Image (cartoon, grey):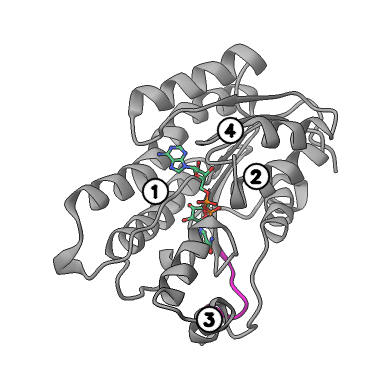
Amino acid sequence: MTLKGKTALVTGSTSGIGLGIAQVLARAGANIVLNGFGDPAPALAEIARHGVKAVHHPADLSDVAQIEALFALAEREFGGVDILVNNAGIQHVAPVEQFPLESWDKIIALNLSAVFHGTRLALPGMRARNWGRIINIASVHGLVGSTGKAAYVAAKHGVVGLTKVVGLETATSNVTCNAICPGWVLTPLVQKQIDDRAANGGDPLQAQHDLLAEKQPSLAFVTPEHLGELVLFLCSEAGSQVRGAAWNVDGGWLAQ
Ligand code: NAD
């Protein structure tokens, strides 16, 4: 399958899952709009290896004006976005009564509202070109809860709901919208939770094992490449009637 001539915008793609997905899409021939914090040079170099064009925009997606600037860049450089992967997300763990108000606002803004804004900005061009794919990286926490993750679980359930609505509103077109719901993937976001468990002299390897053993029956991490390959399938003709789905890739987490 080739995505030559298509443009993919992957939010939060300077590290972790977003970078892994961007690499798989670039390997299939898509030009890439990268976004995220930190030095973008390593990510841009990874993408360039595939002989496609890539640009980076450092938009903070908790700010609507910056989201609009990101899409304006994609329009200027590539004439629009064919594949939108709404991936950027953050986590904060605290009991609901002690949840910091600013963390709640930031998580809802980035993990949920930015998905709405990206979708509304990408859809008109997709409809005009009569092809598009919107893929929202939700989480198993879009389908079940866990303690300490009030804002994250609320936002991800919201993303799964939004995905259904957009899937329905585009159902008779060649635009599809789906969510992917990963279990544990070993990225900086999860490493922080492992480090927190191992704080006060705990064994990091034991902390990693305990984190998996609590929820993920395979006792193995999902990888960004696994998720990238599923994104690629959703971009293919075979994936064209998957609409409004929330597809878990979770080592068995939700089978329990
Ligand atoms: P990560 O921390 O490795 O990467 C997050 C990316 O988002 C980075 O590029 C970062 O710069 C960017 N980012 C952070 N705040 C931003 C902001 N305000 N504006 C723009 N970009 C911002 O995280 P990850 O684990 O790769 O997570 C990616 C997505 O996958 C998130 O939505 C997360 O909720 C979801 N997810 C992760 C896991 C997991 O186990 N890692 C499981 C399920 C779902």
Give left or right: position of 19 versus 191.
right
- Marker disc for residue 203: 3
The quarter of the displayed image where residue 13 is located:
top right
Say which of marks 2 and 3 sits in front: 3
> Marks 2/3: CA distance?
29 Å
Mark 2–mark 1 CB contact (< 8 Å): no
- Marker disc for residue 19: 2
Say which of marks 1 and 3 sits in front: 3
Residue range (magenta) = 247-253
> Marks 4/2: CA distance?
13 Å
Q: Which residue is mark 1?
A: 111
Q: Is residue 140 above or below residue 209?
A: above
Amino acid type of the residue tagged 2 in the rendering? Leu
Query: At which x and y percent is residue 254?
Result: 51, 79
Whether ligand 1 has any atom under 8 Å from the Cβ at mark 1 is answered as: yes
Give left or right: position of 246 versus 109.
right
Q: Is residue 236 above or below residue 94?
A: above
Whether ligand 1 has any atom under 8 Å from the Cβ at mark 2 is answered as: yes
> Marks 2/1: CA distance?
17 Å
